[in-house]
Image (cartoon, grey):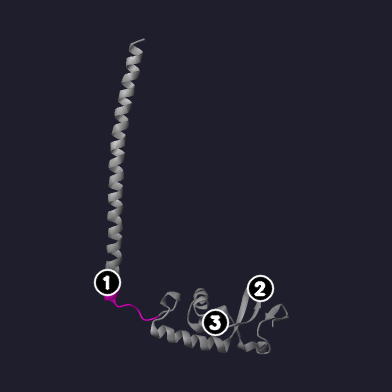
């Protein structure tokens, strides 16, 4: 049950008389060790473990400091395991060999796409040249017809 006081909407009454326990998103991000933007990804992926909002006012939300610390420890454990690296979490890095191998695969695929595109454009170019020559020949024939018509008058 939510309750309003001084513009705040209290979602969890047990924190109402504990102002030191209330933190905002910036502080939550700092405790968890991620950027404020990364919090959205964490909330989407780990909604059950993400700290629950204790109060809000407009777009501003507040969380429990103790729950943030617990969540931060949980996220730190994920980082050690290398989980969630695309969520703004800094986990173990790939080795230089793994990076080089990935780059070889990526560039090979890019080369295949470029070659396919080149072949497609080459065929298109050849058709365009052939079409231009056909149109030029038709134009020459029509110009001759016009000259012949004018000479016969």
Q: Distance of mark 1 from mark 2, alpha carbons?
A: 49 Å
Q: Residue at x 27, y 42 (%)?
A: 126
Q: Is residue 97 magenta?
A: yes
Look at the numbered disc 3 and give the secondary structure of its residue: helix
Residue assigned mark 3? 28
Give neighbour class at mark 2: few <14, some 14-19, many 20+ (Cα, 10 Å).
few
Q: Quadrant of residue 64?
A: bottom right
Residue assigned mark 1? 101
Q: Residue at x 42, y 74 (%)?
A: 86
- Find the magenta span and give its range: 91-98
Which of the two discs, 1 and 2, labels the residue nearer the N terminus?
2
Question: Residue 88 location, x and y as percent?
Answer: 45, 76
Q: Quadrant of residue 103?
A: bottom left
> Marks 2 and 3: in contact by CB < 8 Å?
no
User: Of residues 54 and 147, which is closer to you in this image?
Assistant: 147
Count of marks overlaid on the render? 3
8 left or right of 94? right
Question: Residue 57 location, x and y as percent?
Answer: 66, 76
Q: Residue at x 45, y 85 (%)?
A: 76
- Image vertical order of residue 50 relative to residue 112, above or below: below
Question: Residue 4 location, x and y as percent?
Answer: 72, 80
Give neighbour class at mark 3: few <14, some 14-19, many 20+ (Cα, 10 Å).
many
- Which disc is residue 58 wearing? 2
Give neighbour class at mark 1: few <14, some 14-19, many 20+ (Cα, 10 Å).
few
122 left or right of 29? left
- Image vertical order of residue 45 relative to residue 112, above or below: below
Mark 1, mark 2: which one is toward the viewer? 1
């Amino acid at each position: 049950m939510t309750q309003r006081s001084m513009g705040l909407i209290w979602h969890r009454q047990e924190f109402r008389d504990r102002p030191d326990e209330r933190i905002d998103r910036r502080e939550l991000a700092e405790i968890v060790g991620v950027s404020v933007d990364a919090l959205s990804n964490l909330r989407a992926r780990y909604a059950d473990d993400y700290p629950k909002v204790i109060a809000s006012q407009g777009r501003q939300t507040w969380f429990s400091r103790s729950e943030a610390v617990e969540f931060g420890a949980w996220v730190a454990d994920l980082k050690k395991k290398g989980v969630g690296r695309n969520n703004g979490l800094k986990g173990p890095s790939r080795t230089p060999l793994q990076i080089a191998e990935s780059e070889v695969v990526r560039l090979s695929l890019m080369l295949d796409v470029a070659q396919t595109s080149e072949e497609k454009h080459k065929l298109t170019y050849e058709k365009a040249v052939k079409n231009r020559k056909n149109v030029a020949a038709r134009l020459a024939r029509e110009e001759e017809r016009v000259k012949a018509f004018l000479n016969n008058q």
